[in-house]
Amino acid sequence: MLALLMIIVGFLSRLVVHAPNFTPVLSLALLGGVYLKGRQAIWMPLVLMAFSDAVLGFHDTMVYTWGSILLISLIGLWLKNHKNWANVLSTSIASSILFFVVTNFGSFLSLYPHTWGGFKQCYIFAIPFYRGTFVSTLAYSFVLFAIYEWVLKRSQGTALARLV
């Protein structure tokens, strides 16, 4: 149930008009790594991306985008055993940086001259978009983890706790 809810929220967040790169997708991948069981932690964000990219349009750098989302899910799996607010903060920051580095490398390979100048230009042009990624990952991670922990504590021993 949690995986389905995460897919729906992530899917809808990519479809509604939003500031560039301001979505909960990275936070959902991190959250999924922590709270989903087994393989769900890996496939949930990939299904989210596949459904939303099917609507928004597939692109040449999908392997880098999806690959970075997968790596963020793996960071979430690490966070599962090291969960505290400092680690949620640091893994959120690391996730946004990882996404920036990996996806822009894909952009460099497909859109820019394969020179040092093309490499620098790619990353410099991407800096304004990083702001949305960074702020949204921090904000959504804080909100989603706080809500999930609150619901988990409030539902201990109830039918809801068994569903999540």
Image (spheres, grey):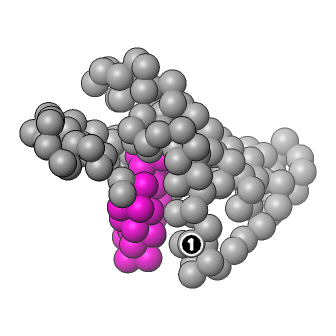
39 up-or-down from 92: above or below: below
Point out residue 119 in the picture as x, y percentages from the top left corner. Answer: 78, 46
Left or right of residue 87, residue 128 in this image: right
In the picture, residue 12 is in which quadrant? bottom left
Point out residue 22 in the picture as x, y percentages from the top left corner. Answer: 40, 59
Task: Give the residue displayed 20% in from the left and 38% down from the top.
Answer: 152
* Residue 88 makes an appearance in the image: yes
How would you classify the magenta stretch by its main secondary structure? helix
In the picture, residue 71 is in which quadrant? top right
In the picture, residue 38 is in which quadrant? top right
The quadrant in which the N terminus is found is bottom left
Badge 1, how many Cα within 10 Å: few under 14, some, many 20+? Answer: some
Task: Give the residue displayed 87% in from the left and 56% down from the top.
Answer: 113
Camera-side residue of 134 and 116: 134
Residue at which label 1 appears: 51
| Farthest-out residue, left | 154
Camera-side residue of 103 and 161: 161
The segment highlighted magenta reads 3-29
Point out residue 147 in the picture as x, y percentages from the top left corner. Answer: 19, 45
Camera-side residue of 52 and 41: 41
Amino acid type at circle 1 is Phe
